[in-house]
Amino acid sequence: MSAALDAIIIGAGSAGLAALREVRKRTDRVRIVNDGPWGTTCARVGCMPSKMLIEAAEAFHRRHAFDTFGIRGQAGLSVDLPAVLERVRALRDDFVAGARKASDIGTLGIAGRARILGPHRVEVDGQVHEAGSIVIATGSRPTVPEDWLAFGDRMLTTDTLFEQPTLGPRLAVIGLGPLGVEMAQALARLGVEVSAFATGKELAGLSDPSVNDALHGLLKDEFLLHIGGDVALREVPGGIEVTNGSATVVVDQVLAAMGRRPNIEHLGLETLGLGLDDHGMPPVDRRSTQVGDLRVFMAGDVDGHRTLLHEAADDGHIAGLNALAPDVRGFRRRTPLAIVFTHPNAAVVGRRYKDLMQGESVTGTVDFTRQGRARVALRNHGRLSVYAQRDTGRLLGAEMCAPGGEHMAHLLALAVDRELTVQDLLRMPFYHPVLEEGLRTALREAASQLPKASDSDLSACGAYGSSALD
């Protein structure tokens, strides 16, 4: 048995590394255990390599606007897909190396598989470690039905997609959540014949019907989109047959994008002495990351709540603070923010449309078809909806598929966090010509539905006189 530690962290992804940073400020009696490749999911197989692929796809797709801008010769452009994927891997490796260097794990890292033996004991490949606290940050992995694994390397996930030297001409994407729509659109724009399948109508995490319909209309013009029914796969001459009962295609490869599952198998959660739910998870307080009333904390994708890097980093930060604190503290979490890097961007901020209580809110919308700056840039597609509390005008949330949506989403997240009203936002300056003028249109529509609607975006300055400011 090793000497007692103040804390042991299981998993060296975004959450685990964030926890390590906090623990190391207080003690050097800590170890971080990792089973498999070092480097965060985001840097290795997630947000960074996917954005590299998306940027290449967008650069090539812009050729369709050249003639309208008066730029000729777009017909001579072509995609070298192996070169695109090679750049993705090279830049990805640089980000992974940067993340490892910034973490400076040094001798604190242990490579191996960990198993919890109790609230203060962890076994790593036969060696038992005693620790005052345990942080569980084992992350998640792509979901793939067991029988689909029989297709071998033709069955892709984000863990394997970016390792491919090239791709076949025909690809099926199963699942149209954030990852599925991003990869389906990007690969279609890079010349792959994409057929996408989803069981439900909601795309990219959107729940507002009008916004979802706008995104659906844009995507179906770029690749084959099949909604509804369970998807079945079988081997046929010439490839893999994919069908949902109403549509059937034959492809060379399949990308499974049906979500992720937490890495908890054989972890020993049952030894903590707490009841586990139907998914094998113990009770976790999201505000403190504490598991039950134990000195055990669960952070990052493994808790399955919001599988986003900034949420995982916050989880790890909180877990690291609490791991050595005499009293466990809870923290107010950030305003929910999710961005999908389709073009136009899809995003959800704060309260989702489907979570609004009937009658409590008003909705303001804008269609970007006629929005000035969007028309100038030939990006005049998409829709944005904002939701405000009916009695106070306070902004509750927003959903969008809009040009520049990633930036407007951040602006709206700040407004929700600061509990600003629609009128507060309308008092802010809106420069001309910018895409945010479209947001102003939606805010004005919401403001017009409030019980005490103002007749001006500006604040009155009281009685007018010679002392009034210019």
Image: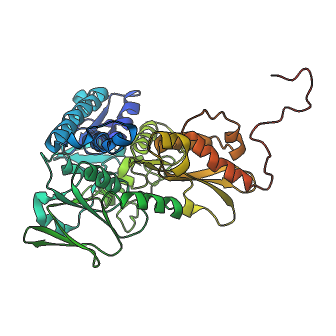
Residue 380 can be seen, yes or no: yes
Determine the residue located farthest toward the bottom in the rendered image: 245
Q: Is residue 114 left or right of residue 423?
A: left
Q: Quadrant of the C terminus?
A: top right
On the image, the x and y values in percent for residue 411 come to 56, 39
On the image, the x and y values in percent for residue 235 come to 11, 71
Residue 433 figure quarter: top right
Residue 264 figure quarter: bottom left
Residue 12 can be seen, yes or no: no
Q: Quadrant of the N terminus?
A: top left
Q: Please state which of residues 449 and 163 is positioned toward the viewer in this rendering.
A: 449
The type of colouring in the image is: rainbow
On the image, the x and y values in percent for residue 60 come to 28, 42
Q: Please state which of residues 176 and 83 is positioned toward the viewer in this rendering.
A: 83
Give me the residue at 60% from left, 54% from top. 365
Does 324 appear above or below 115? above
Does 35 appear above or below 235? above
On the image, the x and y values in percent for residue 267 come to 27, 55
Q: Please state which of residues 196 and 261 is positioned toward the viewer in this rendering.
A: 196
Does 80 appear above or below 151? above
Total marks placed: 0
Q: Is residue 2 left or right of residue 314?
A: left
Determine the residue located farthest toward the left in the rendered image: 237
